[in-house]
Amino acid sequence: MKSLSALMLIGMLFAISAVNANWGYSRVAEKCQETYAGHCKKNTICDDPKDPGYCDVTDDSDLAIPSCMCTIWTLIGKGDCYKGCMADRFDPRIVPNIPAFCSSECKSYKLKTPKGCPPIPQSCKLD
C-alpha cells in the first residue's frame, strides 16, 4: 500500500511540474510560450557571488507569458479577459474546470494591474 501511495504522489508531482513547466494547456498559452520562451534576457542570481555553484539562471518569460495571455484574452473578449479566456481552447486533462480557472487567472491579473494586463518585461521585448 505504501508503494502505491508513493507512486501516486510521484505521479501528482510530475503532473504539477508539467503544468508549471509547460504553458501548453491552451492555444493562447502555447502561442505566448512560443513567442516569449527563450526570448528574454537571462538573469544570474547568486547567493554568494564568490561561489558560482550557488547561482540560478532565470529569465522573465514567467512574467511575459501570463502578460501575453492576459493581453490576448482581453482582445478576444473585446475588453473582458474572462470572456476571452472562456473562448480559448483548453486541454481538459490539464484544466478540468475552465470557468474557475479563467475567473482566477483574470482576477489575479486585475490585482496586479487594475487598469489592464501586466506589462511585458523590458528584457523580453521582441524586435
Image: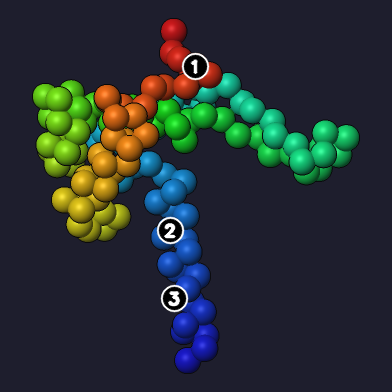
Residue in the foreground of this view, choosing between 39 and 69: 69
Residue in the foreground of this view, choosing between 105 and 41: 105
Label 2 Cα neighbours within 10 Å, binned few <14 / some 14-19 / many ≥20: few
Is 78 on the left or on the right of 110, as rendered? left
Position of residue 64 relative to residue 47, above or below, is above
Is 68 on the left or on the right of 122, as rendered? left
Give x and y (percent) for residue 63.
45, 32
Residue 30 seen from this side:
no
Q: Which mark is residue 122?
A: 1
Q: Amino acid at mark 1?
A: Gln
Give x and y (percent) for residue 107.
26, 42
Question: Within the image, what quadrant is residue 118 found in?
Answer: top left
Give x and y (percent) for residue 21.
46, 46
Question: Within the image, what quadrant is residue 87 found in?
Answer: top left
Name which of mark 1 and mark 3 comes first in the sequence: 3
Give x and y (percent) for residue 94.
30, 55
Name which of mark 1 and mark 2 comes first in the sequence: 2
Question: Within the image, what quadrant is residue 58 found in?
Answer: top right
Residue depicted at x 53% and y 19%: 123
Position of residue 10 relative to residue 64, above or below, is below
Label 1 Cα neighbours within 10 Å, binned few <14 / some 14-19 / many ≥20: few
Residue with the mark numbered 3: 8
Name which of mark 3 and mark 2 comes first in the sequence: 3
Q: Kindly state the secondary structure of the residue where label 3 is placed.
A: helix
Q: Kindly state the secondary structure of the residue where label 2 is placed.
A: helix
Label 1 to label 2: alpha-carbon separation: 29 Å
Q: Amino acid at mark 2?
A: Ile
Residue depicted at x 66% and y 35%: 57
Tell me the quarter of the image containing the C terminus.
Answer: top left
Residue with the mark numbered 2: 16
Residue depicted at x 34% and y 29%: 113
Is 5 on the left or on the right of 88, as rendered? right
